[in-house]
Image (tube, rainbow, N blue to C red):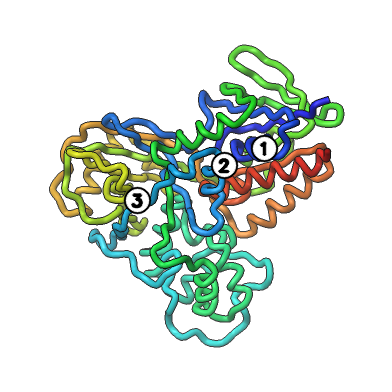
Amino acid sequence: MTKRVVVVGGGIAGLAAAHRLHTQRPDLDVVLLDQRERPGGKLSTGALAGHPVERGAESFLVGGPSAAVQLAREVGLGDAIVHPGGAKAAVAIGGVLQDLPAGTLMGIPLRGPEEPPGPRLLQPGEDVTVGALVRPRRGDDVVDHYVDPLLGGVYAGRADRLSLRMALPALAAAAENHATLTGALAEAAGAGRREPGAPVFGAIEGGMSRFVDAIVRTLPDVRTNATVQSMRRGGPGWELDVRVGKDKRVEAADAVVLAVPAASAARLLDQDNPLELDYASIALVALALPATKLPELSGFLVPATEGLAVKAVTFFDRKWPHLRRPGLTVLRASVGRYGDEAQLQRTDDALVDVVRAEVARLIGVDALPEPLDRGVYRWGGALPQYAPGHRDRVAALRAGLDGQPAIAVAGAAYDGVGIPACITSGRAAAESVLAKLGD
């Protein structure tokens, strides 16, 4: 009889898992269930003033063997990958936009004050916060003005709370080999060195929803508005209670991939959530303005020390040449940091107003023109906040699943934010259940 694998969750991790399952084993009955109206999760493209605008993630890393580039090629979009132009980013310090310094790793200067000899920075497997490693060796200004806003742009989190091994894994590994931060940074920077002029980021021309749609077209059975309410062992595998509208049914599966947030996975597995994982919420405010003169930048970051609601701004038609439109200027601001969710209690109109006021102040104009169109995209509980020791807790969770019928977990909750990390996580989960299923 044909074996069935059910993937729960249609974000990019679940889509990648289903794609890998189907391509590796086309003899399997692969079913993807997503509780939303359309798959994709945070990969969602809308329209602003008649042109595409990302409601969520706008780009992915392309350096090294990028899982995002690989998957895009596999689904026929290799030629649709586009890259940013050459404009630089800035950071707001004291209300003034300044260039991000060169010669840094995630804002940490590669060279710093002389450090006294001592033991290695980290013992094998040890984990600390980014701030705990960097503050004593590079100072508060470096962390507060550069490291924190750069991490905030990725995680909406803070250097003094985020796990070094999750946020900067290459630096954590190098710290096991060196007694000085300078030495560890040199090793980490060398491991990530790329060809001069090679792009760092990529996007899909036409929008991230095009990426999602291309993956979905390769899958045999995708069901939306399908909520998995509970699951249990059944026969050699699993039984899932699924609600679609007012209808309920039981789906049997020989294997399951749970590509949902950690708390949801724990509930379905009827166990406590062992990850101690908090999430940050954000809102993205996109403004389509009549042609407006902006600084020659791709955008800028805003440290928490500035006391503003906005934490990052992208000038879309400066950053992405393929998005330039005559007579139109598009920017998008990110609001919301971990621990500062009160900023998100504003109405959409109020968020637009505060973004317009703060961006105008930082670029040195009295006011931005009235938008031709605007969009406010809210992502509640969007970004996991990895505390030190996260990798060990994930390993323990996965070890606890080994004695059960074929099941795996995937997604940002476990293996890192960013599109390539989530794709890699989904693919690894697929390989895990395939190994358990056998031939």
Which residue is identified by label 3?
312
Could you say where residue 286 lies in the image, as x and y percent from the top left?
31, 38
* For residue 334, side relative to residue 297 (left or right): right
Callout 3, which amino acid? Ala
Badge 3 element: strand
Badge 1 element: helix
Q: Quadrant of residue 150?
A: bottom left
Toward the top, the furthest residue is 246
Q: Are marks 2 and 1 in contact (CB under 8 Å)?
A: yes
Callout 1, which amino acid? Thr
Label 2 to label 1, Cα distance in Å?
10 Å
Q: Residue at x 57, y 21 (%)?
A: 225
Q: Quadrant of the N terminus?
A: top right
Q: Is residue 92 visible?
A: yes
Badge 2 element: helix
Are there few (<14), some (14-19), or many (20+) residues within 10 Å of tag 3? Answer: many
Check the image and report above or below for 315 versus 212: below
Label 1 to label 3, Cα distance in Å?
39 Å
Could you say where residue 109 lies in the image, as x and y percent from the top left?
42, 73
Q: Earlier in the sequence, mark 2 or mark 1?
A: 1
Callout 2, which amino acid? Glu
Could you say where residue 38 lies in the image, as x and y percent from the top left?
51, 26
Query: Residue 271 versus residue 398: which sits nearer the camera?
Result: 398
